[in-house]
Image (spheres, grey):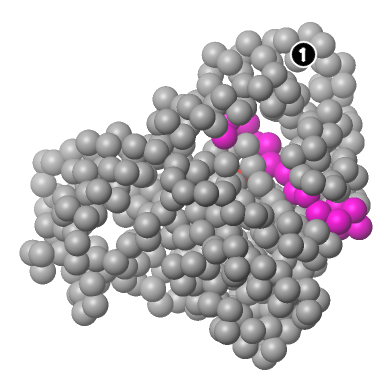
Amino acid sequence: MKTDKQEVSFNRGVPATQSLPKGKVSEVAASVLDRYGDSLLQYGSSRGFAPLRKKLADWYEGATSDGVLVGNGSLQILDMIANLYLGPGDTVVVEKPTYDRAITIFNRAGAEVRGVNLEQDGPDIEDLEDLLETHDPTLLYTIPDFQNPTGISASTKKREELAELTAEHGTLVVEDSPYRKLRYRGEEKPALRSFDTEGVVQISSFSKLVGPGIRVGWVVGNSEIIDELAVYAEDTYITPGLLSQGVVNHLVGEGWLEENVERLIGLYGPRLEATLGSLEEYFPEADWVRAQGGFFVGLWLPENTEVNEFYNGAEKENLILSSPEGFFPDRGGEDFVRLPFPALPPGRIEEGIKRLGRVWRSL
Ligand SMILES: Cc1ncc(COP(=O)(O)O)c(C=O)c1O
């Protein structure tokens, strides 16, 4: 039996509804249709809208438009990379835990997925070295900034070591960084790709900066990979959603995007503080990540917790949690809890974490 308490959902990592720029998108869509309508509503290059590719290339030192493809969200770009470069017999290394949909994509491509242990400052380098030597993986997938699902950011040293090791082994690296601009505390770290522009491709997205429904993501990488992705994209969807890309191009060009990132930091920063502060106050027995940005704080239940009972107790308290198994490539990890905080006001976060602590103490 559930209590009649109002639900608190720590289920999905989605932006706050109030952050979705409906009015702005409507206004900009009308204006870009006026200006570029004939090309935005027509078939175009599978690489995406040229003015947006140019602006994105300018974000990266030494990059040109030839090294950028803009597609329908970053997840589909990851799927294209997996379909192009992976098949049965290939191994992919991912962090343990990692983004559940990435595991699904690699499995679906027929690859074997292996997990490298994730520490508070990024992947365990010794463990990685071991995996590279014993499994000779084709691809390594990593989320160095405010990782989904843990909130962990890799240290600069580990980024450097990881890039060096994978270059030595000739392993293609996919750096997934949709949360990179959403830093609420601490100092920015160099992108992984800055240590190896040939061997690392970076994928990213406007889903968390504008809204997921706009479906605009991009990849920056060496031009050979981008050329191959462009052919694959053309054979898959001919042209990406150009109207969305025209809107995003305008939002970036007029400086709205940078202002919006500041607004999002103002909205989400206090939500991260509420999450960390409430854990300290109501659930100090647990072990959690001192995240500095992004959408998630990962939490490990105290040792010897009866995990099933904990999850059942949480359900009775009307707490919605995502099931942790999906984040672990080789299962395990049942004592992990992902807390996405952006969509909840601080008071709801506090209430949810109070209930989490209460459930654990009641066991
Ligand atoms: C790490 C990571 N990569 C990719 C995505 C998907 O992004 P997009 O909406 O651009 O497909 C998400 C969404 O939650 C994510 O957390």
In this picture, is 143 found above or below 35? below
Whether residue 180 appears in this view of the structure is: yes
Specify few, some or many for label 1: CA neighbours under 10 Å numbering under 14, 14-19, or 20 or more: some
Res 217 → quadrant: top right
Q: Residue at x 69, y 26 (%)?
A: 252
**In this rendering, is residue 74 above or below 300?**
above
Which part of the image, by quadrant, shows the C terminus? bottom left
- Type of residue at label 1? Leu
Query: Where is residue 330 shown, x and y percent of the image?
Result: 50, 78
At 66% from the left edge and 72% from the top edge, which residue is drawn? 162
Residue 223 drawn in magenta:
yes
Q: Name the residue under label 1.
A: 33
Q: Residue at x 63, y 66 (%)?
A: 159
Q: Where is residue 262 in the image (x, y as percent from the top left)?
A: 51, 29
Residue 292 image point, x, y percent: 44, 50
Where in the figure is residue 350, as x and y percent of width and height? 21, 43
Q: Residue at x 35, y 52 (%)?
A: 339
Highlighted magenta segment, given as a residue range: 209-226
Magenta-colored stretch includes residue 101? no
Is residue 90 something one can see in this rendering? no
Which image quarter: residue 35?
top right
Residue 60 higher or lower than 243, as above or below? below
Residue lying farthest to the bottom in this orientation: 134
Asked if ligand 1 lies within 8 A of label 1, the reply is no
Helix or strand or loop: what does disc 1 sit on? helix
Question: Would you say 312 lies left or right of 20 here?
Answer: left
Residues 305 and 291: in front is 291
Number of numbered discs: 1
Q: In this view, does 154 lie to the left or right of 251?
A: left
Q: Which of 362 and 252 is in front in this view?
A: 252
